[in-house]
Each structure stands twice: as structure tokens, then as C-alpha cells.
Image: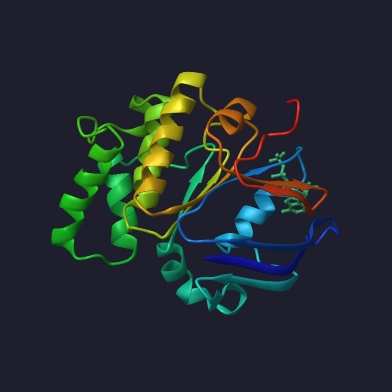
Amino acid sequence: MIEMHDVWKVYPNGVEALRGIDVRIDQGEFCYVVGPSGAGKSTFIKLMYREEKPSSGVILINGVNVKRVRDWKIPYLRRKIGVVFQDYKLLPHLTAYENVAFAMEAIEAPRRKIRSRVQEVLELVGLGDRMDALPSQLSGGEQQRVSIARAIVNNPGFLIADEPTGNLDPENSWDIMYLLEEINARGTTVVMATHNKEIVNTIRKRVIAIENGVIVRDEDQGEYGYED
Ligand SMILES: Nc1ncnc2c1ncn2[C@@H]1O[C@H](COP(=O)(O)OP(=O)(O)OP(=O)(O)O)[C@@H](O)[C@H]1O
């Protein structure tokens, strides 16, 4: 479960990106985060995986206060939370297989487990036959699928995605969405910031709308609600 209690984020330049966020996302939910550009969506997401710290307020991930996690323990926190970005962030000199294996090596998973698990997740995302390709040899949709494989390889309870379809054409975007739904159906909580109106209005899920750093709407099976 993810909980935020009166969370504020003020960047050093004085911008109040989040202003008193109260929210609870339960295990197994699928939740979109929508809102105009600059509303605070990325900040909201960054706080969940401790890329940023709250200026005040409390964030609990499965009951653990994220702010109090010592820096050296952050890899263990991140093990519980897979993250997917708009621009994939794959390591360019590593193959698809190596990019995914790297996430297991980072948490010192036993060597014998790595091979079978990496193969398993790459097959799940439909890339069982492209494991030896470098990112530059893969399409955008394929690269995003590698990044999703990397995000789920350590079996996290949460998958956090910041505009995962932002760089993709509609067909690849739908494929990524079906994959995220499949991952959610297997029990992982999915939180996804998006500007994709068609997806939000078609694959209906909980919608949290943020404007000017405040949650202005929180609806199950909600609509996108903006024109862009
Ligand atoms: N590192 C930073 N330092 C200073 N200000 C920042 C920083 N990151 C974001 N901001 C500001 O905080 C506000 C919220 O930004 P954020 O990236 O969370 O919005 P967003 O809703 O994700 O926007 P978009 O849809 O354009 O990605 C904006 O005014 C932005 O300029």
C-alpha cells in the first residue's frame, strides 16, 4: 500500500510542486495520474520511489516511512518498486538480456536464478527471441518492453510508470498497456502518469487528477477529463 499524508514538495527554487497531498493506493490497484503539464505528476511519482524527498508530510510504502530510509537501504526499497520511464533509460552498451539481468545483479540475486528469471520476463514481454539485441537494434516499443521487463524482474509489489507511452505510436502504446494490465492482473500495483486521453478513457481505471500541486479529482473508472 502507498499512503501520503499532507505531503508537500517545494523545490529549492521555491516552486511548490505538491501542496498537501493525501492519498492511499491499495495493493493490486491500477491507477492513472493525470493533469496539465507542470501540475506535479512527475514529482508525485518521484516521491514514491524516493527519487525526491518530501519537504513535509509522510509517505508510507507498505507501512515504511520513505523519508526515514537510509541512503544505503534505497536499493532495497527500490526492489519493491519497479520504475518505467518515457525514454526507457536502458544502458546502451548492454543487450536486452544484460539490461534486465543488471537489475537482478544490483540486488545480488543468486547467479543461478538470474538466467532463468531474465528469460522468463523477456518472454513475458514478448522478446524471448531478441534477448541479444542492443537497445539501438530495437524499436521504441521493444525498448519499452525491455524496460518493463527490467522493472518487474525482481517481482516488485509496485510498478510506477511516468508517461510510459509518451514516445510511442498508438499501436505500440496499446501493446504496452495490455502488458501493464497483465502485470497488474498478476498482483502488482500499477501507478501510471499519462497524457494519453484515449487510453485513460478506454481502459478504465482509477484516475487521480493533479492540478497546481493539489489532487482535484480521484475517481474509480474515471475519465481523462482534459482536452489534450
Ligand atoms: N528539479 C526541479 N527543480 C525545480 N522545479 C522543478 C523541478 N522539477 C519540477 N519542477 C517544477 O515543479 C512543477 C511540477 O513539475 P512536474 O514535473 O512534477 O509536473 P508534471 O505534471 O509531471 O508535468 P509534465 O506533464 O509536463 O511532465 C513544475 O512547475 C516544474 O517546473
Q: Position of residue 194 (x, y in %)?
A: 62, 37
Above or below — where is 221 with respect to 5?
Answer: above
190 left or right of 20 in image? left
Considering every residue shown, the one lying at the far left of the view is: 112
Considering every residue shown, the one lying at the far front of the view is: 220
Task: Name the residue at 21% across, 34% down.
Answer: 128
Task: Name the residue at 42% across, 35% down.
Answer: 144
Q: Is residue 101 visible?
A: yes
Q: Is residue 95 visible?
A: no
- Decide which of 74, 211 is in the foreground and name it: 211
41 left or right of 140 in image? right
- Decide which of 88, 63 is in the foreground and name it: 63
Task: Name the residue at 43% across, 40% down.
Answer: 180
Q: Position of residue 68 (x, y in %)?
A: 59, 79
Task: Choose top left, top right, bottom left or bottom right for residue 8.
Answer: bottom right
- Decide which of 133, 117 is in the foreground and name it: 117
Q: Position of residue 93 (x, y in %)?
A: 35, 40
| Number of numbered discs overlaid on the protein picture | 0
